[in-house]
Image (cartoon, coloured by chain):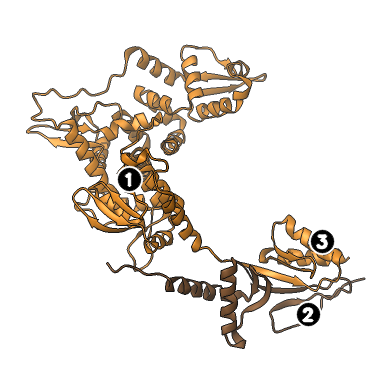
Chain colours: A brown, B orange
Amino acid sequence: MVSKPVSGFCPFQQIGFYDCRFIMVNATKGLFISCDIPMAQFIVNMNAALPASQKFIIHVLDNTHFFVQPDVAGMIRSAISEFRDQNSYEKPT
Amino acid sequence: MPRVKIIAKNFMDMVASLPAIKLDMLYRNQFICEAILRSLPPLAKKYVLQMLYIDAPITCKSLQEWVLADGFSKHNVAIDRLVQLRVFEVTDRKKETTYKLNPTFQTSLRKHLIHGGILPREPMSPNVIAKLPTSEELDAYALEQWECFLLQLISSGQAEKSSSFGSSMMRIFQRGLLRQREKEAPRLTDCGFQFLLMDTNAQLWHVIREYISNSEEQGVDQADLIAFLLELSFHTTSEAYNLDTLTDDQTAMIKDLADLGLVKLQKGSKESWFIPTKLATNLSVSLADTTSRKQGFVVVETNFRIYAYSSSKLHCEILRLFSRVEYQLPNLIVGAITKESLYNAFDNGITAEQIVTFLQQNAHPRVAEKVPSVPENVSDQIRLWESDLKRVEMTPAHFYDEFHSRDVFEAASDFARIHSDLLWEDAKKMHMVVRAEINTLMLEHLHGKNR
């Protein structure tokens, strides 16, 4: 049995279907995020606040891991540091 | 302090990399032989001394009989070092290898042992010299020069008087220690911070090594410089030596050494002379790795305040790297460790471990006896603040689902696990996440499994 790769296109950046009669695996490219539970909630909250076209979470894997779209790394980091700075107070010199 | 040994060993590596002819010429000088002897590991020292009066070559096997069975690794390290420095000459005959002490090295060391070291120059007589500085004045001068140089090294523009080192030389020293971003003042890297944390001797060796590696481009012979430097370390402190006894190259080098604080140059009515300081004479001592603790000056309190009993600008600069300096009194620097100041330090690449080690090593004698010398809440908080910056980890990855059968899923997950690229998997739903790098391999593997 010879397997033929058949490429299919979907809106969520899939590499493609490999239709081989026996093996069919769906591969999605993105970013794997691992953090602690409070940060995870923060990310979920941030995702919910965005309009539908900009939502970046593809899968919620469990309560400390996510799979998101690949280009949001910078945005998440800056949002986290903004959140961290909101809690800081510096004594004026 | 094992660090000094590593830095000094780097210097010795440089010596070992000289061509054989130059090394032979170096070994004619008794002081260099002594310096090399000091820098050897203890077992190697023993071998050299044992072979000093043996003229016939010794076979490798009989050499091994000198060591117990569990010392073989040290034995091999020692032999390697000796061969590298060409102190041992190796002859490979058909049956076995034999070792013999380098004859030049052997004669020089024998002479040195019997006659004691005689320097090529005599200290000048007191009637020629008007007034010699006392040893305290000399120490103070050396310290001042060295600190000035360090200050200039880490932040140009802070030192009051600039040394005569050209800016290209300074840039060479700064290479690896400072990082310059565009439009910003050069900032210290974490290697630079490590450098500041080192012992003075280790710092000196590092600077001298850079200086010597550079001298080749200036056209000065490396071997001559190394010879002169090692000779200098055997002179007596606080004795004046005439500048006329030096060659041209050595005179040029002496001027640079004066800027570093190793010697003090003085001029009389007719003649000029140089006086080696403790920094110079300690150079050779530090080869043998004796620990010399300088006195600490920092008290850290549980309310995150730092009190540094020092009037040195260098210490102030170092503290400014990771703490907020609030007041500066004539003998005291008061500062506070704050989250913002630490974030600044972490931005520069300094780690929490380095900061805590610095505070512990430089603890004031009053608090140094307490265990721990830095309060635990301060050291813990510094580490917590560092980990706060690393709460979220992001890895480019691929997500696989819709596996046709459990076997395929298991095979894929084993494949990923072997390459340690499996990031997450859910066996029930048959989903997995692997690192992006393995994606093509994985798909080929799955594709290949089908055939």
**Along the polypeptide, which appears first: circle 1 or circle 3?**
1
Q: Which residue is mark 3?
A: B411
Q: Name the side, left or right, on which B369 lies relative to B442.
A: left
Of tags 3 and 2, the one toward the viewer is: 3
Question: Which three-letter amino acid code belongs to the residue tagged 3?
Answer: Ala
Q: Chain of mark 2?
A: A
Q: For residue A69, what is the image quadrant? A: bottom right
Q: Residue at x 20, y 29 (%)?
A: B238
Q: Chain of mark 1?
A: B
Query: Which element carries disc 3, helix, strand or loop?
Result: helix
Q: Which mark is residue B228?
A: none
Same subunit, labels 1 and 3: the answer reads yes
Q: Is residue B287 visible?
A: yes
Q: Which residue is mark 2?
A: A7
Q: Which residue is mark 1?
A: B218
- Dot 1 alpha-carbon crowd within 10 angstroms: few under 14, some 14 to 19, many 20 or more: few
The percent coordinates of residue A40 (x first, y second) are 59, 71
Q: Residue at x 10, y 28 (%)?
A: B129
Query: Which element carries disc 2, helix, strand or loop?
Result: loop
For residue B420, above or below residue B229: below
Looking at the rendered image, the quarter that the N terminus of chain B falls into is top left
Question: Which three-letter amino acid code belongs to the residue tagged 2?
Answer: Ser
For residue A4, above or below residue B19: below
Q: Is residue B208 visible?
A: no
Viewer-side residue, A3 vs B281: B281
Q: For residue B62, what is the image quadrant? A: top right
Of tags 1 and 2, the one toward the viewer is: 2
The percent coordinates of residue B448 (x first, y second) are 83, 64
Q: Chain of mark 3?
A: B
Label tally: 3
Q: CA distance from mark 1 to mark 3?
A: 63 Å
